[in-house]
Image (cartoon, helix red, strand yellow):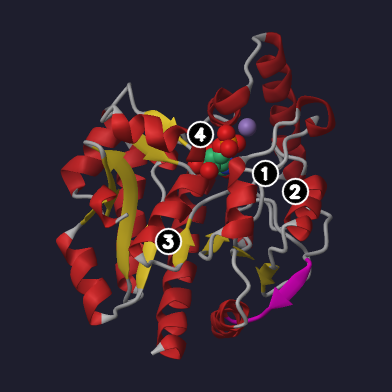
Amino acid sequence: MHHWLNIHPEVKTALTEGKALVALESTIISHGMPWPKNVETALQVEQEVRNQGAIPATIAILDGKCCVGLTTPQIENLGKATDAWKVSLRDMPYVLTNKLIGATTVAATMRIAHMAGIRIFVTGGIGGVHRGATQNMDISADLTTLGNTSVAVVSAGVKSILDIGLTLEYLETLGVPVVTLGQDEFPSFYSSKSRFRSPLRLDTTQEIASLLQTKWSIGLEGAVLVANPVPEALEVKPELMEKHIEAAIDAANASGISGKDLTPFLLKYISEHTQGESLAANIALIRHNAACGARLAVEFHQLAS
Ligand code: PSU
Ligand code: MN
């Protein structure tokens, strides 16, 4: 398996010296935000991780290898590339074999992080069960991967472009603990509210670190989904978002967008139609998640060592 990994020297040293590490995805860079904000944000997120005393490892597939830890020029190339693949699990063998440029989704990033021995991963929002899934069967491979890959995922909850209720049901079926930090309600990315009660609540990252250790030490495979609610000052009004989400879904249906193109289409549409308000919140949120995930990594690490 290690034949397929290309681990950045700093990450390799951190792994051998037993330092806390945080994995970061790259689809958010290539398909989640426009250039140059995408590159700026990816670098700021890495800095947030360092500020808390952990080492960042942004993950992508380049030159036929699963790269764990990217250089700044590699992040810049990924942010500018117009031919980067959005790589979920099913795309990994093709993109590796053909040495294509691959930006990894939550699912693919989790698998690569796990191959490298990294247990904490930070993102903005995960994929889930799409609205209308009872008809279109559009359920992200992020969910099945959460069910079988032992990496903790820190996000700001689930964006309401998805069916949040069905996503929580699916995570229950897969046996994934869903823990919200510091409140009873599950957050929905731009909003700290979703009208769904969080299955679990813990008030400190230290308690979450203990939960991770317990889950994995009793032999339960799979993720823990940590929901880190957006701070009030950064919230975008749900009424405003809902209007744009419905318009985005209508536009996707009208132009026949489906499958892997759907999530990037919806994210782009919403960002463009909120005059960048959602993009600014998106950036602040991911940075907030990075700080939270890095603290969790440091605490999990102390428990494990
Ligand atoms: N949801 C977001 N922001 C994102 C994504 C999802 O709020 O950037 C990206 C992530 O990379 C996630 C992927 O893993 O989209 C899910 O795509 P799909 O729904 O096609 O599985
Ligand atoms: Mn899908």
Q: Is residue 217 left or right of residue 249?
A: left
Labelled disc at residue 114: 3
The residues tagged by marks 3 and 4 sit, at their Cα atoms, a distance apart of 34 Å
Question: How far apart in space, not on screen, are marks 1 and 4 (Cα)?
Answer: 24 Å
Q: Are marks 2 and 1 in contact (CB under 8 Å)?
A: yes
Check contact, mark 4 vs mark 2: CB within 8 A. Answer: no
Question: Mark 3 CB in 8 Å range of ligand 1?
Answer: no
Dot in front, 3 or 1 = 3
- Looking at the rendered structure, the kind of residue marked 2 is Thr
Q: Residues within 10 Å of mark 2 (few under 14, many from 20)?
A: many
Side of 275 relative to 52 (left or right): right
* Residue receiving disc 1: 128
Residue interval drawn in magenta: 199-204
Q: Residues within 10 Å of mark 1 (few under 14, many from 20)?
A: many
Mark earlier in primary sequence (3, 4): 3
Q: In the rendered image of this protein, does residue 4 appear above or below residue 220? A: above
Q: Which residue is mark 4?
A: 276
* CA gap, disc 4 and disc 2: 27 Å
Mark 4: which amino acid?
Gly
Q: CA distance from mark 3 to mark 2?
A: 23 Å
Residue 147 on image: x %, y %: 64, 57
Answer yes or no: is residue 101 visible. no
Query: Would residue 116 be seen by someone viewing this image from the given angle?
Result: yes
* Place of residue 34 in the rendered image (x, y in percent of width and height, measured from the top left): 40, 31
